[in-house]
Image: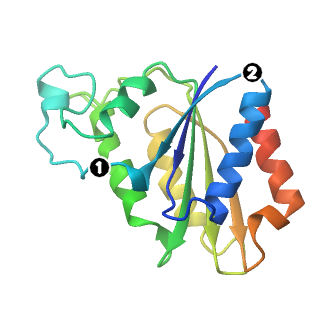
Amino acid sequence: MKVLAVYGSGRKEGNSSTLLRRAVQGARDAGHQVLEYEVYDMRFGGCTGCRKCKEGGEKVCVLQDDLRPYFEELYQADAVLVSAPNHTGQPCGPMITYLNRHYCLLDTDWNVKVKPGIKVAGFFSQGQLDEACYQQTYRGFMADYQRRNMELIDILVHSGPTPAGERPDLMQRAYELGKGL
């Protein structure tokens, strides 16, 4: 199984990254191939609405930036795992821009171009103690994948001041999610 892991935090040792890294370890321990992408290390912009991905017969976004290899791999992927910290009540800006670029996965008739059933999971972190506080926001973010015929398997949320790495319950859940892909 090919798994794409997209780290969306500028803090590589931050809570959302820690959870995703644990899921990646589970996936690797299960024998899956994992390709990792660090959004903050990549150069890319938002969708320009040029529609070349729809009208020009392009398979992926025509913008020549660091997201192009990700989109090319997405066509062979079996799972996509994404992480993001919560900034001002929503996933951080670069992850919103990254998600915005998935517009290229739809043709002119709004048919999805990637294979159906790619599994997706989200790993989010927030300072808010109430884990359920932003659940609707995270579900909305992940719904964009579902609109592209991907299967949402789980959303893990780290909340509060205790580092994710010191939460054995959450770390085990992340590991098992990755291993169970």
Seen in the picture, residue 149 relative to 125 is either above or below; the reply is above
Q: In the picture provided, is 29 more to the left or to the right than 107?
A: right
Picture quadrant where residue 159 is located: bottom right
Residue, x 74% and y 38% (percent of image)?
Answer: 25
Looking at the rendered image, the quarter that the C terminus falls into is top right
Residue, x 27% and y 35% (percent of image)?
Answer: 104
Residue that mark 1 sits on: 43
Looking at the picture, how far across and down is residue 9, in whole percent?
A: 51, 61
Name which residue type carries label 2: Gly
Looking at the picture, how far across and down is residue 146, in whole percent?
A: 50, 40
Report if residue 155 is visible in the image.
Answer: no
> Is the residue marked by circle 1 packed among few (<14), some (14-19), or many (20+) residues within 10 Å?
few
Looking at the picture, how far across and down is residue 71, in whole percent?
A: 37, 31
Seen in the picture, residue 122 relative to 126 is either above or below; the reply is above
Looking at the rendered image, the quarter that the N terminus falls into is top right
> Is the residue marked by circle 2 packed among few (<14), some (14-19), or many (20+) residues within 10 Å?
few
Name which residue type carries label 1: Arg
Q: In the picture provided, is 48 more to the left or to the right than 164?
A: left
Residue that mark 2 sits on: 31
Total numbered circles: 2
Picture quadrant where residue 79 is located: top right
Q: In the picture provided, is 149 more to the left or to the right than 169?
A: left
Seen in the picture, residue 108 relative to 147 is either above or below; the reply is above
